[in-house]
Amino acid sequence: MPPENSKRPCRALGNSQLKVSRLCLGAMMFGDQTDEPVAREILAQFREESLRVAQQLGEHFARKGVWLSHFATAWVLAHRAVSAVITGPRTFEQWKEYVSGLNCEITPDDEALGDSLVSPGHPSTPGYNDPAYPWEKRPA
């Protein structure tokens, strides 16, 4: 569940006294806009397990009349170590959708479903390590 003060417009950044907006605008863009063939290539890199989880969450929240992107924003903000979500909308309409996500409430049933689909603290495939970003031990 989101903390009691989750509806406040600002939060303390970590243990500091610095106040930040719960939703921050990240306007950085690398290269050109992705075209459809590149987008399909990127999509093909997603693991089947992750796509199944997204499908199940999407169905659950569609029944509740909630956009999955709104749930994702609320889910991240509900973590006590997270001060803000950095978004990167390309249009004003996308920005309004991100802001709408601040009103999404996570219920105990939502929390239980998320935990049943993905074990807390793990990726959608427990034990999976992305070969593009291998996990390495600290040097001795």
Image: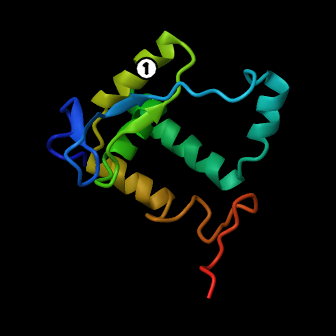
Q: Is residue 56 left or right of residue 45?
A: left
Q: Quadrant of residue 95?
A: top left
Q: Amino acid at mark 1?
A: Glu
Q: Nearer the viewer, residue 34 or 17?
A: 17
> Can you say whether 75 is above or below 122 in the image?
above
- Residue visible at 32% across and 55% down in the picture: 81
Q: Nearer the viewer, residue 113 or 27?
A: 27
Pointer 1 local density, CA inside 10 Å: few below 14, some 14–19, many at least 20 = some
x, y (%) of residue 3? 20, 47
Q: Quadrant of residue 134?
A: bottom right
x, y (%) of residue 50? 62, 51
x, y (%) of residue 73? 40, 37
Q: Nearer the viewer, residue 19 or 119?
A: 19
Q: Image quadrant for the C terminus? A: bottom right
Q: Nearer the viewer, residue 55 or 105?
A: 105
Considering every residue shown, the one lying at the far left of the view is 4
Residue receiving disc 1: 97
The colour style of the image is rainbow
Mark 1: which secondary structure?
Answer: helix
Q: Is residue 84 left or right of residue 59?
A: left
- Residue visible at 59% across and 79% down in the picture: 138
Q: Is residue 105 left or right of residue 59?
A: left
> Can you say whether 2 is above or below 29 in the image?
below
- Residue visible at 31% across and 34% down in the picture: 22
- Residue visible at 75% across and 62% down in the picture: 131
Considering every residue shown, the one lying at the far top of the view is 92
